[in-house]
Image (cartoon, rainbow, N blue to C red):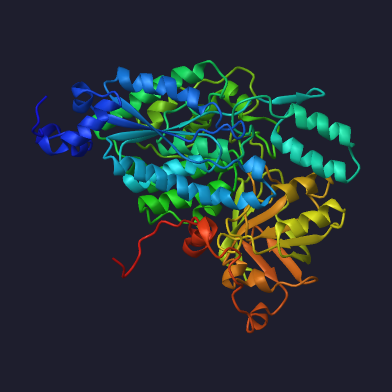
Amino acid sequence: MTQETDIENSKRSDAIVKGPSRAAARAMLRASGMDDENFDGPIIAVFNTWTNMGPCNMDLDKLAVPVRAGIRAAGGTPVDFNSIAVSDGITMGSEGMRASLMSREVIADSIELAVKGHSLDGVIILVGCDKTIPAAGMALARMNVPGVVLYGGSIMPGHHKGKDLSVQDVFEAVGACAAGIIDDEELKDIEKAACPGAGACGGQFTANSMAMAMTFLGLSPMGMNDIPAVDEDKNKAAYRAGQVVVDCVRENRLPRDMITNTSLMNAAIALSATAASTNAILHLLAIASEAEVEGFKIDAFDTISRTTPVIGDLKPGGKYMAYDLHKAGGSALIGRRLVHDGRIEDSPTVTGRSLFEEIIDARETEGQDVVLTFDNPVKSRGGYGILYGDLAPEGCVVKLAGHGALFFEGTARVFESEEECFDVVQNNGIKKGDVIIIRNEGPAGGPGMREMLGVTAALVGQDLADHVALITDGRFSGASYGFVIGHVAPEAAHGGPIAFVRNGDKVTIDVEARSINVEADLKARSKDWTPPPPKYPSGAYAKFARLVGSASKGAVTSFPFEGGV
C-alpha cells in the first residue's frame, strides 16, 4: 500500500486511512476485517433505521444484506450504522407520539455524525416508518455527501370480509365501535387482520408519500421504493442500490445537484397529484431548508394544488393502496402522466440518468384504474391548500383528500390537548357544525407536533368527517381525512391567535379564498397573555421545544445560528 495520498484520486475516507499518521486508525479497521484493498477503495456507510418495534422497519436488517453485497460488487466497502426509529402507528394518540417528529431531527443528526465523523465516502440510508425518510433527505441535503435513499417498502393489504385493510381501518373501527356501529368482536377481528406482515402503512400515507418524494427528488432510483417490503424483487433492488451509491461516489454525484427548486417542485406536484400526506409539506420544506434552496416556500403547495388534479385513486381518500399502485405501474406511471401533460421538469438523479430518462421505462398494466389521466381525474383539484387569516397569520395546511367541500362555517369547540378532544369524541360529544380546535400541540408547545389520527379516524367512524372541521397547531397522519386543517402558525405556545379562540366563536374557512378567520377580537384577548411554562424542564423533549422553528418553515432544529461561534 502506498502511504502517500494521491491528490488526483483522493477521497473523503483518506482522512482516516491514508498516510503514516493514520496507522492507529488502520490498525483498528484491520481488526474489523478491512485490509489494504479496502483502504484504497470507497468506504460506504450502510445507515439503517431497523427496529422490530412494529412492521414498518422490521425487515431492514435483512434488506441490508443485498445492499452490502451490491456495494462490494461495485468495489466499495460497506460499514454499518443504526439509529432510533419511532413508530407513528404504535405511538399515535399517546404521550410517545411527541417523540415522532423529534426523531426526524435525531436521525438526521445521527446520519451526519456517523458519515462526517468517520469521513466516509458515501452513504445509503435504509428507511421505513415515515420520519426516517425525510430525515434521510435532510441529512443528505445538509452533508452534501454522495448518497442514496432506499425505502423498505409498503406492507401488503390485510383482508377482512372481502375488503382490503390498512391500519387506517383499525383507527376508524375504534370510532365506529364507540358509536355502536360495530361491536367489540368486530373491532378485534379488524385489528387482527389489518397488518399481515413487514412493511410501512399501506395507503398514500406519510411513508409512501415521502418514498415517492425521494424518487422525484432524484435521491432514490425510480421504481425501487414502490416495491412492497415482502416482494421477492426487493432484494434485487437493494443489490442494485448498493451499486448505485458506489457509482455516485466515483462520479461525485452530490445530493445538492439533485435537491433543487425544480426537483422540489416536481416532488410536490407528484404528491399533490396523488392526494398525499400533509406531512410531506412539512418534510419537503425541511429538506429545502437543509439544502439552502431559498425559493421553495409553503405557498408553492397551494399554487400546485390549484392547478394539479388528483390522478391517483389512493387511500386515505381513494380506493387503492400502495401495493395496487405498484402493480399498476408505480411512481414511474405517475411521472409519465406528469411528463405527458407538461407538469414537471427534467432533473438529475442518483443513477446518472435524468428523471425523464428514468420515467421512459414506465409500464402501465392493462386495465388498471389506480392511476387515471388528467383528462379524467379522480378530483379536479390537488390534495392541499394553504390558508391565511386572523387565525393563522403565518399560514396553515388544509388537507383536501377525500373531502369535496371547500367552505365550512361553524362554531368553535376548543380543546387544550388531543386527549381532551378524543375523550369527548369517544363519548359522542361532537355534533354536526362544530369546528374542533385542538391547540397546544404545535412543534414547541406539544412539544413534538403530534398527529391527530385518533381523533380524525374516530370522527370518520362516527360518520362525522363531512360535517365537522378540525383545526390544530399539531399535525395529521397521512391516513387522516375529512375537513382537517393543521400546522397552524404561529402556534398557541408562541402566542399565536389560535391560543385566544373561545368556545362559541364563529369560524369561517374558505379554501378558494385561502382564508381562515374568527369573528372575535383575538388581538384584544392576547393582551394579558403570558407564555405557558415548558411541559418538560429537561431532556430531549425540552431541547427540541427550545430549538424548533415554525411549522411554516418545516419545524426544523437545524438552522444557521447568528452571532455565535
Judge from the rendering whether residue 323 lies leftward or rightward of residue 31; answer left or right.
Answer: right
In this rendering, the answer to whether 468 lies above or below 176 is below
Q: Is residue 138 visible?
A: no
Q: Nearer the viewer, residue 425 or 92?
A: 92
**Residue at 69% in and 59% down:** 471
Residue at the (63%, 22%) spot, across then down: 368
Q: How many marks?
A: 0
Horizontal and vertical percent position of residue 81: 40, 35
User: Which of 562 and 213 lies nearest the eye of the viewer?
Assistant: 562
Place of residue 364 in the rendered image (x, y in percent of width and height, measured from the top left): 55, 21
Q: Quadrant of the C terminus?
A: bottom left
> Residue 157 vs residue 302: left or right?
right
Q: Is residue 149 above or below residue 386?
A: above
Q: Is residue 510 visible?
A: yes
Q: Looking at the image, is 369 positioned above or below residue 385?
A: above
Indicate the quadrant where residue 5 lies. Answer: top left
Q: Is residue 324 left or right of residue 46?
A: right
Residue 501 sits in which quadrant?
bottom right
Quadrant (top left, top right, bottom left, bottom right) of the N terminus: top left
Q: What x and y, as percent, mark residue 303?
A: 53, 53
